[in-house]
Amino acid sequence: QVQLVESGGGLVQAGGSLRLSCAASRRTFGSYAMGWFRQAPGKEREFVAGISWSGGGTYYTNSVNGRFTISRDNAKNTMYLQMNSLKPEDTAVYYCNALGTKLTTTPGDYWGQGTQVTVSS
């Protein structure tokens, strides 16, 4: 079982930046591709970004490409999402997810509790 804990959310003005972190349980983190998803009020949860187990491969949804950067530090069992040039439409609860052995936009079974990101206009 993978345990995931997100942090780093908050309230920021449009154009600002935030960095989210996802801390994972030690035994399994390095063997999983990982991803970030988000869910805005009244909308379905959607894929944001993913990273391979080694960190060598990344993938972004079109709406965040060029603004967000996903990374990981396997020595620290932690994944990050650097979010720049934030827009009001980025407002959502952000979740980290253990995707599985391959980088994919389909979520795996393990989720964190989520962290709220609110971008004011």
Image: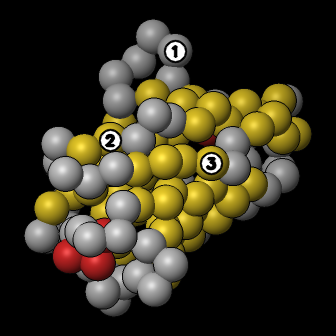
Comparing 119 with 26, the one in front is 26
For mark 3, what is the residue?
Answer: 7
Assign a secondary structure to mark 3. Answer: strand
Q: Residue at x 87, y 39 (%)?
A: 13
Q: Amino acid at mark 2?
A: Trp
33 left or right of 76 in image: left
Few, some or many residues within 10 Å of mark 2 (<14, 14–19, 20+) = many
CA–CA distance in space, label 3 to label 2: 13 Å
Q: Residue at x 35, y 30 (%)?
A: 45
19 left or right of 92 in image: right
The answer to which image quadrant residue 35 occupies is: bottom left
- Considering only order in the chain, which callout, 2 or 3, is on the residue closer to the N terminus? 3
The answer to which image quadrant residue 12 occupies is: top right
Assign a secondary structure to mark 2. Answer: strand
Assign a secondary structure to mark 1. Answer: loop
Few, some or many residues within 10 Å of mark 1 (<14, 14–19, 20+) = few
CA–CA distance in space, label 2 to label 1: 18 Å
- Considering only order in the chain, which callout, 1 or 2, is on the residue closer to the N terminus? 1
For mark 2, what is the residue?
Answer: 111
Give the position of the C terminus as an image quadrant: top right
Comparing 91 with 2, the one in front is 2
Residue 82 appearing in the image = yes
Q: Amino acid at mark 3?
A: Ser
* Coloring applied to the structure: secondary structure
Q: Position of residue 79 (x, y in %)?
A: 48, 67
Residue 89 appearing in the image = no
Position above or below: 28 against 4: below
Q: Residue at x 67, y 36 (%)?
A: 117
For mark 1, what is the residue?
Answer: 41
CA–CA distance in space, label 3 to label 1: 19 Å
Q: Position of residue 76 (x, y in %)?
A: 50, 78
Q: Position of residue 29 (x, y in %)?
A: 31, 70
